[in-house]
Structures are given as structure tokens and as C-alpha cells.
Amino acid sequence: VALDRIVAVVNIDTVGTTIIPGVDSSFAIGSEYATNIRPLIHANSKTSNYVAHAVSSFFDGSDGNRGSDHLPFRKASMPVVWYAGGTPAEYHTPADEVNLVDWPKLAGVTRHALLTTADLANTQTKPEFVTEPKPHIDDAVALLEMAEVALQDPGIVSRLNESMLDLAKQWVEKLQDYVQSPPQTEAEWDEYQTFLKGIIALVYTLLV
């Protein structure tokens, strides 16, 4: 298929599992590189009665070279969105068995991805590629949900010691502040994104 005939690439990879047990929502990654896709994700979180957070590519490292099957398309300036649930510790190990699948979550993210794909296929306004994405508050919303779940039951993250718990509580307070009062200036948005990327780096150290 000629690239100029592609409206967008919807990648559905590693859904039905989670990076933190108890996180019921999923991620719709990479829509910051396109116009018009994030509003569809927001709308379908209501229509499908299932939440998929429209998070940025740094959530999984695919803002660089780490990523999934959509990455070559994004590098070719194609609008993309990658549905993912997060990878548990058993991922790509002999313990990676079917019992790790959360079937209600799998059904929910499937409905969401189906609706978004249909919307993209039927849209009269083709998404355009965004070369220089801007930070957005959806990233903080997704991180806040994960942090709150982890703090409700710290034992689910085996490497979350007392000092890390204190740090996580500070993160939650700052994330709540960002969600309630998003940054206004470019400098504030830069500080916000640096803060979020620091959290993500540490989350991967603890969980992956």
C-alpha cells in the first residue's frame, strides 16, 4: 500500500496484561505525533465504557528506537497509535502463560481500539503528522492512576521500599497538582515533561 494512501497506523500489541496489577485501564501510545487522534481516544473512552490513556511515546521508550511494529511507520511520518496494556514481569519468560491475561481488560481495550479504528477509517479529516509534539496533561493522568494503585497495595511492587514509598507519595501530590492546574508557559511544560520522564525511567528500573 502506498504511504500516501495510509490514513493512520493502529498497532494492537501486548493488550490484556498490565505493568502493575490492579491497573484496569490501558495505554494508547503515540498520538502526540498526529492531529485528531487524541480526541478520538478521549471520546471512545466514554463510548466504549473503557479507559485508554492517550499517553506519549516516552512511556515505553518508543520516542527513541525502542518500540513496537508501528515505529517504522512513525519514522516515515505516518500518524500512529499503539494500544498496549503494559508488560508484566513474566513477559518473555517461561512463566509468560495465558493465566496472565485479564479477559475483561482485553475485551475493553478491544472495543476501544475497534471504535477508534472505525473512526479513523471513516473520518473526513485525515490526521496529519506532527513533527514536534507538545507535552500534554494525559501523561500525568495515566501516571497518577498507576501511582495511586501501587500505593494502595505497595506489596505488588516487590522493589518498592520505604524510601521509594515516600518518594511515590511526593510524586502523587505533584501529579495531582499538575492535573488540577496544568502548566501554562513553555518553561512550565518543559519542567513538567522532565519530571514525568524521570518517573517513567525509575518505574522501568523497578518493574521491568
Image: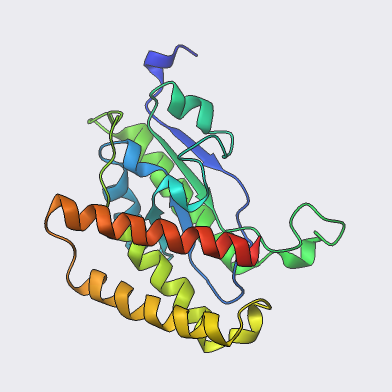
Is 99 placed left or right of 181 in the picture? right
Q: Which residue is at the front of the view, 98 or 27?
A: 27
* Vertical placement of residue 71 versus 92, above or below: above
Q: Which residue is at the front of the view, 130 or 125?
A: 130
Name the residue at the right extreme: 94
Name the residue at the left extreme: 185
Is 170 placed left or right of 164 in the picture? left
Is 13 placed left or right of 50 in the picture? right
Task: Tell me the quarter of the image containing the C terminus.
Answer: bottom right
Tell me if residue 52 can be seen. yes
Residue at the image point whose x is 32% and y is 59% from the top: 138
* Vertical placement of residue 160 versus 117, above or below: below
* Vertical placement of residue 205 versus 38, above or below: below
Q: Position of residue 126 (x, y in %)?
A: 27, 28
Q: Position of residue 175 (x, y in %)?
A: 32, 72
Residue at the image point whose x is 80% and y is 59% from the top: 96
Q: Position of residue 13 (x, y in %)?
A: 60, 45
Residue at the image point whose x is 42% and y is 40% from the top: 117
Q: Quadrant of residue 162?
A: bottom right
